[in-house]
Image (spheres, grey):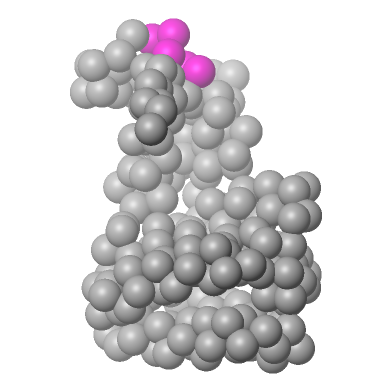
C-alpha cells in the first residue's frame, strides 16, 4: 500500500477548509494570517497557498486592503448553489446507477452504513459523509467534468447543509430521504433516483429559505 505524504500547504488547506465548512470561522471577518500561521504551525508561504486554493474553491474571498475573508452565507448564494445541484446531480446520479459495478455498489453501501450510524448526529463528520454519499451516486457515470463541478458545488453547499440540519429531527428526516435514494440507486431505477434527488435538494432549499436571514 502506497503512503501519501501531504505537503504543509495541503495539510493547512484541509484543516482550514474543515473549519470553514463547520462554520467555525466567522464570515466577512478578515483572517489574521499571522495568528493562523502560528496556530497551524506553518510558515506564511504554505498558508497563503492554502488560502489561495480555498479562494479558488469559492470558500474565501480576497480584498486588496483586507486580505482573505470567509465568504458570507446568503440566500442568493444558496439559491444559486442548490439550483446548480438540481441541474447537475439528478441526471448524473441516474446515469451512475445504470453504470454501477458491484464495486461501486459496495462503496456506496459502505458510505450509506456510515451515514446510518450518524443519522441522529449533527456533526462535521455527518455532513462530510453526506457529501461522500452524494458524490458516490454520480461517480460511476464516468463524467469527469461533471463530477469535478459537483465536488465544488457540494463544498459550497456544505455550510448551508449544516445550517439546514440544525433544527431538531432534521437529520433523521434527511436520512430517510437518503435511504429512499439509496434503495432506488441500488435497484437501478434511474427515473426514481432522478425524481427523489430533485425532491431532496428542493426541500433543502425550501427549508433554507425559511431559515436564512428572516
Magenta extent: 44-49
Q: In this view, does 213 lie to the left or right of 122?
A: right
Name the quadrant of the N terminus.
top left
Residue at image coords 74%, 62%: 141
Viewer can see residue 61: no
Number of disc labels: 0
Q: In this view, does 38 lie to the left or right of 23?
A: left
Is residue 90 or residue 185 the one in the foreground?
185
Residue 185 percent across, percent down from the top left: 61, 81
Q: Main secondary structure of the magenta part?
A: helix
Q: In this view, does 210 lie above or below 73?
A: below
Q: In this view, does 106 lie to the left or right of 123?
A: right
Residue 2 percent across, percent down from the top left: 41, 28
Whether 118 is among the magenta residues is: no
Q: Is residue 20 above or below residue 128?
A: above
Q: In this view, does 38 lie above or below 160?
A: above
Is residue 124 or residue 178 the one in the foreground?
178
Is residue 80 or residue 94 the one in the foreground?
94
Is residue 71 or residue 113 the one in the foreground?
113
Residue at image coords 27%, 63%: 123
Residue 153 percent across, percent down from the top left: 63, 55
Whether 45 is among the magenta residues is: yes
Viewer can see residue 4: yes
Q: In this view, does 179 lie to the left or right of 186?
A: left
Residue 183 percent across, percent down from the top left: 53, 88
Residue at image coords 34%, 53%: 22
Residue at image coords 35%, 74%: 113
Amino acid at each position: 500500500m502506497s503512503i501519501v505524504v501531504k505537503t504543509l500547504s495541503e495539510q493547512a488547506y484541509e484543516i482550514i477548509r474543515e473549519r470553514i465548512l463547520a462554520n467555525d470561522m466567522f464570515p466577512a471577518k478578515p483572517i489574521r494570517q499571522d495568528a493562523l500561521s502560528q496556530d497551524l504551525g506553518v510558515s506564511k508561504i504554505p498558508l497563503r497557498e492554502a488560502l489561495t486554493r480555498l479562494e479558488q474553491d469559492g470558500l474565501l474571498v480576497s480584498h486588496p486592503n483586507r486580505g482573505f475573508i470567509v465568504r458570507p452565507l446568503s440566500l442568493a448564494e444558496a439559491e444559486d448553489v442548490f439550483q446548480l445541484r438540481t441541474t447537475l446531480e439528478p441526471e448524473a446520479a441516474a446515469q451512475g446507477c445504470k453504470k454501477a459495478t458491484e464495486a461501486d455498489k459496495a462503496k456506496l453501501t459502505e458510505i450509506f452504513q456510515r451515514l446510518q450510524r450518524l443519522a441522529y448526529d449533527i456533526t462535521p463528520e455527518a455532513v462530510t459523509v453526506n457529501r461522500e454519499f452524494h458524490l458516490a451516486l454520480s461517480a460511476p457515470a464516468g463524467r469527469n467534468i461533471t463530477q469535478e463541478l459537483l465536488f465544488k458545488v457540494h463544498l459550497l453547499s456544505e455550510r448551508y447543509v449544516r445550517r439546514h440540519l440544525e433544527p431538531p429531527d432534521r437529520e433523521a428526516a434527511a436520512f430517510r430521504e437518503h435511504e429512499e435514494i439509496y434503495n432506488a440507486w441500488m435497484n437501478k431505477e434511474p427515473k426514481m433516483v432522478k425524481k427523489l434527488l430533485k425532491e431532496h435538494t428542493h426541500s433543502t432549499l425550501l427549508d433554507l429559505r425559511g431559515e436564512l436571514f428572516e
